[in-house]
Image (cartoon, rainbow, N blue to C red):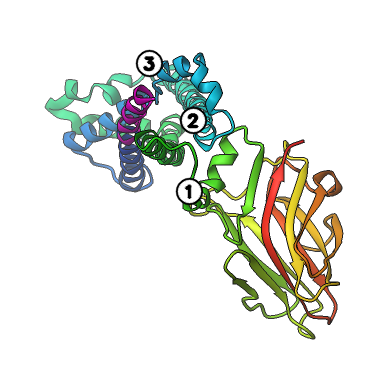
Amino acid sequence: MKSIASGVQSDIRGLNLLSTARENIGKKSDSIFSHYILSDAKTISIEEVAYINGAFQNVLNFIYFKANLSAFESLKNSTYFGKLQGTDLALLLNAYYTNADKIKSIEEKYNERIEAFRMLWLAKFRDNGQNIFTRPWDFTDDFSSFAPRYFEILRDNNTKSIFGSAYNEPSIIQTYEEQILMGDKLIEMIKNSKTSFDQQTKLDFSGILYSFADADLISILINGQIPTGFEPKYAASGLIENYYSNKEDYFVIEYPENKYAWGSPYFEINALEGRVNEMDFSNYTKIFIEMKGEIGGEQFEIAMKDKNDPPDGTESRVKMELTDQWKIYEIETSKFKTADMQLIMVPLGFVFEGPVGRKIHVRSIQFKKD
């Protein structure tokens, strides 16, 4: 396990360097667009040309993350790995290396796109101004005379495609940040000989960890606490107030009496500062909700919504009626026929209608496989 921790530490160093490189090229591309491509500039110094040339070459020099896999491969072939199965540490290990494969796929697609743009660019400018753009130092004696042609090449759609891709390159950083987060936790758990998450770690990781690992469950609520990556919201027929509250180990949802024609408190996906707002739930066939009513007899409906569902209440729903005792309610996800399970934005919503007020207590919400 120490060799895995060492490999992960090396991975993190590489990921930090990659993050810096991608952030820098994004800033450079933004600057080039602002000051040279989209501007009316007609003159340019050789120093400015050198700056643009350096950025152009940076984009065309592919960089990528290569995870240290040897220690993990050795672990998988050991009897100790079998003993780890079912533990949080095993889940985290699988998630870490599954996400490494995801990063590889994202980078390969990006690099393939850049290579395609490069070939189009060469097809147009080989023997037609290529050297002016890629070897500007050969023209330092009187570069001003080449400036008009240089700007033509710089502002050509083929060049803009290359710099445009580079401008969006920092979006890859979010996958690095997730990998670093998991890597840091792996190192900590290995160092402290831990195989189980504490409660805070479960909250911190649930929103991203279970979306990368081939996990048996996704938790939206754990003992009344909402994991990172999910957020409670409230929609209603009138002015909305906060009708949520947290107790010691459960979550309270209230629908006020004689105030709304309808109200729908719900949980939406909101991970990585809003960059992730949908998830694939297609592998999960059952929902388990531990809840009870304030007095018993509370009636409402449960809903799921994908990102394309209109906000008109036409989504599929399941009717519920609670007692005043804690109970785990099981719902088949197949009942939500209008929800595209690969594009879920609202994994769970509660729908109340009419003038009657209701208050329900919810302890846990889990999506599980068969």
In whole angstroms, how far apart are the C-alphas of marks 3 and 1? 60 Å
Binning the other alpha carbons within 10 Å of mark 3 as few (below 14), some (14 to 19) or many (20 upward) gives few
Packing grade of label 2 (10 A; few <14, some 14-19, many >=20) is some
Mark seen at residue 89: none
Q: Residues within 10 Å of mark 1 (few under 14, many from 20)?
A: few
Mark 1: secondary structure: loop
Amino acid of disc 2: Leu
Q: Secondary structure at mark 2?
A: helix
Which residue matches tag 1? 198
CA separation, marks 2 and 1? 16 Å
User: Mark 3 or mark 2, which is nearer to you?
Assistant: 2
Tell me where residue 52 appears, x and y as whole percent.
27, 34
Location of mark 3 (residue): 126
Residue 247: name its quadrant: bottom right
Q: Does residue 179 appear in this view?
A: yes
Q: Position of residue 274 (x, y in %)?
A: 53, 54
| Sequence-wise first label, 3 or 2 | 2
Q: Compared with residue 325, is residue 213 higher up or lower down, i.e. above or below?
A: above
Confirm whether the magenta stretch covers residue 294: no
Closer to the camera, 31 or 278? 278
The quarter of the rendered structure image containing the N terminus is top left
Kindly identify the amino acid type of the residue bearing the numbered disc 1. Asp
Residue at 43% across, 36% down: 179
Instruction: Tell me which numbered mark, 2 or 1, is placed earlier along the sequence.
Output: 2
From which residue to which does the magenta span run?
1-16
Would you place residue 203 above or below residue 105 in this image? below
Q: Which residue is mark 2?
A: 93
Residue 133 in percent (x, y) is at 29, 26
- Is residue 279 visible in the rendered image? The answer is no
Q: Quadrant of the C terminus?
A: top right
